[in-house]
């Protein structure tokens, strides 16, 4: 559960400037950098948290650094926390981290896009000043999610990876110090349902120590509308206000744990009352068909990289509303909890995606072509990889299970899916995700190298999510043939009677480049491609949504196919609309029924 302030809990945010030192030689652990103040070492500098460190200096060696970097700061434990359990929470350390307080190693975490806690209770006293050190490692391996490999070259080691976005690293989201009571609430699960105008809230509470649980449901105004006693039960909300697209109405489940007649812990869990189901070829929200409009997006901003920033995301959501989007996919990793909070509060539908991107050696950096490796083998992506993948899915579910915005789980983006080895790898992961959550649809995002009939994972999916670049990577510049081929393939997928969602389509577009004949890379070609593609979508009854790739231009690794990043955005990287944005707005606001 995310830290919060309550009558029994307190938080202290540790964002700001930390002491920072890159460790290209890998000497930090052996030399015990955690044991002394980092600022006494040569080369130390200040680094903002949250932020990627890559673009915040003028040094190419730091931008392309491989290995660990060290963050350190001193923090005073609040005096009022005596007798409490004290934890440090890192919301994102990409891609793994180890944490020390003073000279004591407290723990490590694998996976760069999900939060983790370490326990300081036995190593810090209330009122005491402690030194916190974090070693953050950006190296990708065959067992990490996403995968990669550090290769030896004539000029030294180079990080190689197969996802088409820059490998930004650092402490990307907030760091918290937070207190918990010794007898406490450990977990809350809320499973809402609708019965006419009555909300049915199936809840379960886990707690430590001896105690009794009582719950209240508060509406958006703070009024108590229902209550119950016990650690599990079903609460009825008469005249329920459902959570809807564009109207993120939320209730609060206030959980109180009492022990020996005293309140031991209180936690407020927000939730929305809504249902999600697939019926035939439709996605139903609260029993009604919904058509998704929106984007694959990236946590990518100028200077900050993947670092979370309230102002930047505020603008992004305003632009989503302006253009008529009702949804997004967290491509290709879980987004910050603040982003998810906004989606919950504003009725934005989310396809929540695990960071399993790059599990396909037929693709690399957006360029079609073999990579010289076998995707699934004992020496590449193997059982250890799948174990990490399953752990990521578990952590993703635990973090986002109570969110009304999350309507689909995506367990991977564009993996190899046309081999027996790929089926053997993914089938247990689909089963694992469904064992965690039987209520939400589960799927993965299919790449065009695995078309209908060749793909082996289709039978595992509740819906089809397709990435297709007809008119760009295929039939480049030839929209007539591109649309014929798109129409033909969608017709094949439609035979199965499942919902079809286009999760990526589009064209690289250089803002300001214009052409009378609609040449590729021009703003006119982006408009023409999107409009032609939308016309085909409208012919397919099984089609349930369109997510353009991408919301905004974003940074990638260096390469001859990318000029200062991926330029498929409808907005530039600094969030200025390209001409296509206005055409898309006309379509999506019409679909949404807004003038």
Image (cartoon, rainbow, N blue to C red):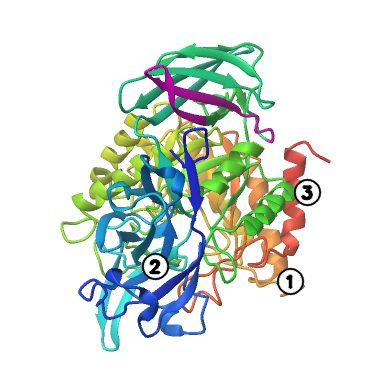
Check contact, mark 3 vs mark 2: CB within 8 A: no
Indicate which label's residue lies in the foreground, 2 or 1: 2
Q: Give the left or right position of residue 327, taking residue 371 as reference.
A: right
Above or below: residue 299 compared with residue 417: below
- Disc 1 crowd rating (10 Å Cα; few below 14, some 14-19, many 20+) is few
Question: How many marks do you count on the picture?
Answer: 3
Residue 583 horizontal/vertical position (percent): 76, 54
Dot 3: element: helix
Q: Nearer the viewer, residue 207 or 63?
A: 207
- Disc 2 crowd rating (10 Å Cα; few below 14, some 14-19, many 20+) is many
Whether residue 545 is visible to the viewer of this picture, yes or no, is: no
Question: Which residues, given as a range, are shown in magenta?
Answer: 246-268
Residue 476 horizontal/vertical position (percent): 56, 66
Q: Is residue 252 magenta?
A: yes
Whether residue 47 is visible to the viewer of this picture, yes or no, is: yes
Q: Nearer the viewer, residue 492 or 595?
A: 595
Q: Residue at x 36, y 63 (%)?
A: 131
- Disc 3 crowd rating (10 Å Cα; few below 14, some 14-19, many 20+) is some
On residue 72, the disc is: 2
Mark 3 and mark 2 lie on one chain; the one further toward the N terminus is 2
Tell me where residue 371 sits by quadrant: bottom left
**Marks 2 and 1, how far apart at CA:** 56 Å
Check contact, mark 3 vs mark 1: CB within 8 A: no
| Farthest bottom residue in view | 155
Q: Give the left or right position of residue 339, taking residue 396 as reference.
A: right
On residue 586, the disc is: 3
Check contact, mark 2 vs mark 1: CB within 8 A: no
Tell me the residue that label 1 is attached to: 517
Magenta stretch: dominant secondary structure: strand
């Amino acid at each position: 559960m995310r830290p919060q302030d309550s009558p029994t809990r307190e938080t202290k945010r540790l964002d700001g400037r930390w002491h920072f030192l890159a460790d290209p030689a890998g000497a930090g652990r052996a030399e015990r950098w955690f044991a002394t103040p980092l600022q006494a070492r040569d080369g130390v500098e200040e680094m903002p948290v949250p932020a990627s460190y890559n673009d915040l200096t003028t040094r190419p060696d730091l931008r392309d650094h491989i290995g660990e970097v060290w963050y350190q700061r001193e923090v005073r434990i609040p005096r009022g926390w005596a007798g409490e359990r004290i934890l440090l929470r890192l919301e994102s350390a990409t891609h793994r981290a180890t944490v020390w307080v003073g000279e004591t190693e407290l723990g490590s975490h694998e996976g760069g896009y999900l939060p983790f806690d370490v326990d300081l209770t036995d190593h810090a006293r209330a009122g005491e000043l402690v030194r916190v050190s974090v070693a953050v490692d950006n190296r990708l391996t065959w067992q990490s999610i996403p995968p990669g490999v550090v290769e030896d070259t004539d000029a030294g080691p180079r990080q190689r990876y197969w996802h088409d976005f820059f490998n930004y690293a650092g402490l990307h989201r907030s760091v918290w110090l937070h207190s918990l009571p010794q007898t406490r609430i450990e977990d809350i699960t809320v499973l809402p349902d609708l019965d006419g105008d009555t909300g049915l809230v199936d809840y379960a509470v886990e707690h430590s120590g001896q105690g009794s649980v009582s719950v209240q449901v508060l509406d958006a105004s703070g009024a108590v509308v229902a209550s119950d006693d016990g650690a599990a039960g079903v609460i009825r909300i008469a005249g329920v206000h459902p959570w809807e697209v564009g109207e993120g109405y939320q209730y609060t489940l206030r959980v109180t744990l009492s022990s020996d007649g005293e309140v031991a812990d209180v936690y407020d869990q927000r939730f929305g009352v809504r249902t999600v189901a697939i019926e035939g070829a439709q996605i139903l929200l609260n029993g009604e068909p919904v058509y998704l409009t929106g984007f694959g997006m990236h946590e990518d901003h100028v200077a900050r990289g993947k670092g979370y920033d309230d102002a930047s995301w505020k603008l992004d959501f305003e632009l989503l509303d302006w253009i008529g989007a009702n949804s997004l996919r967290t491509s290709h990793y879980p987004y910050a909890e603040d982003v998810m909070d906004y989606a919950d509060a504003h009725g934005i539908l989310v396809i929540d995606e695990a960071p399993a991107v790059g599990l396909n050696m037929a693709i690399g950096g957006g360029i079609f072509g073999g990579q010289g490796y076998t995707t699934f083998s004992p020496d590449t992506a193997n059982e250890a990889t799948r174990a990490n993948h399953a752990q990521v899915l578990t952590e993703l579910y635990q973090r986002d299970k109570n969110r009304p915005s999350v309507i689909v789980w995506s367990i991977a983006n564009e993996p190899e899916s046309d081999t027996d080895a790929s089926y053997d790898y993914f089938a247990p992961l689909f089963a694992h995700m469904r064992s965690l959550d039987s209520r939400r649809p589960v799927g993965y995002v299919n790449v065009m190298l695995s078309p209908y009939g060749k793909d082996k994972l289709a039978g595992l999916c509740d819906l089809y999510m397709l990435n297709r670049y007809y008119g760009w990577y295929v039939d480049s510049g030839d929209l007539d043939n591109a649309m014929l081929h798109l129409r033909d393939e969608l017709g094949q997928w439609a035979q199965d009677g499942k919902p079809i969602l286009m999760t990526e389509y589009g064209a690289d577009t250089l803002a300001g480049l214009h052409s009378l004949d609609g040449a590729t890379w021009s703003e006119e070609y982006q408009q023409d491609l999107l409009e032609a593609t939308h016309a085909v979508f409208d012919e397919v009854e099984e089609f349930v949504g369109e997510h353009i790739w991408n919301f905004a231009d974003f940074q990638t690794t260096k390469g001859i196919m990318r000029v200062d990043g991926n330029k498929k955005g409808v907005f530039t990287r600094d969030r200025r609309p390209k001409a296509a944005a206005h055409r898309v707005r006309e379509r999506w606001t019409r679909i949404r029924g807004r003038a």
